[in-house]
Image (spheres, rainbow, N blue to C red):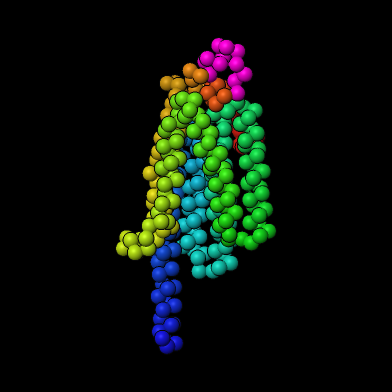
Amino acid sequence: MGPGGRGAGRGLTAYAAGVDDVAAGLTDLLLGAVLVGAALWLRALPWVHKYWTLTMWTAGAGAWAGTVHHLVFAGSPRSADLSWVVVGVLVATGISYLLAATAVELLPPRAARWFIRVRIAGLIAYVVVISTTGVGRTLPLVLSESVTMASIVGLWLYALYRRQPRAARMVVAIVGCGLSAVAFAVPEGVSRHLGLDGRSLQHLAQIPGVFLLARAAAVNLTGAPGTPAPATADSADSAGSGGSGGSVGSGGARSAEAGSAGGRRQPGG
């Protein structure tokens, strides 16, 4: 192939990359709108803990930061690296709030505070790593958030075993969010036929999981707005027998009381 052919090939590649960034930016914009809408809905429900709402707010901010990353900064490697750091920090913060909401609901207050403080330390470590090992790298984010999500899933699976009322809905929602990663396995020929690359398909695939997560968080387990969640059968048994209350079932009732009275604190407060 002559110089002209190589130049034309590079031009087509750059054009395709630009189209993919536009699609990724627009789908991030849509995803952010869904997340912010979910945050507004949850904020209007007095029995929903603040951490669930903050999960949606920060995830929505991360999606909109992704829009800016794809549509504004993608053409400049240095700017794209820096903007990706912002996206990563917002995504990590959103998952941190998801862990905080899970811990406050399922664990006794002391254990919940321990989880939250460990997560804050991990978030600080993530920021230090991406600042010292090179910006724009995805691996630290993937490793950090994989561990956090494993903790969240583990807590809800144990809650499901203990028959915590919200657990089944939450496990389904988390699985729904996780399945969005399948979009990256779609063959390139199929994604090109759809006019979207793996990133854009994954943004769209997250939306059903967001709806499921918001609906699970919005369920009023008490029947009365603004009151703590009732104890499960497990926690009632442990209370009647003088148990220590360290299980997920009994911790959920007391941590719900903490969430109603003082759960409006930020993580680590």
Residue 241 among those drawn in magenta: yes
Can residue 86 be seen from the camera position used here? no
Residue 184: % across, % down: 42, 56
The residue under the point 41% across, 42% down is 176
Q: Is residue 245 visible?
A: yes
Vertical order, 87 against 42 (above or below): below
Q: Is residue 244 left or right of residue 27?
A: right
Q: Residue furthest left?
A: 193
Foreground of the two, 237 or 212? 237
Name the residue at 58% across, 50% down: 143
Quarter of the picture holding the N terminus? bottom left
In the image, which residues are magenta? 235-246
Residue 19, percent from left and from top: 40, 66
Residue lying at the far top of the rendered structure: 240
Give left or right: position of 112 versus 44: right
Which quadrant of the figure contains the C terminus? top right
- Give the residue drawn at x 58%, y 60%: 136
Residue 51: x %, y % from top left: 54, 36
Is 158 on the left-hand or right-hand side of 30? right
Q: Picture quarter containing residue 17?
A: bottom left
Q: Is residue 79 highlighted in magenta?
A: no
- Residue 93 is situated, as x and y percent measured from the top left of the image, at 57, 45
Residue 191, relative to residue 263: is it above or below?
below
* Residue depicted at 55% across the width and 68% down the height: 77
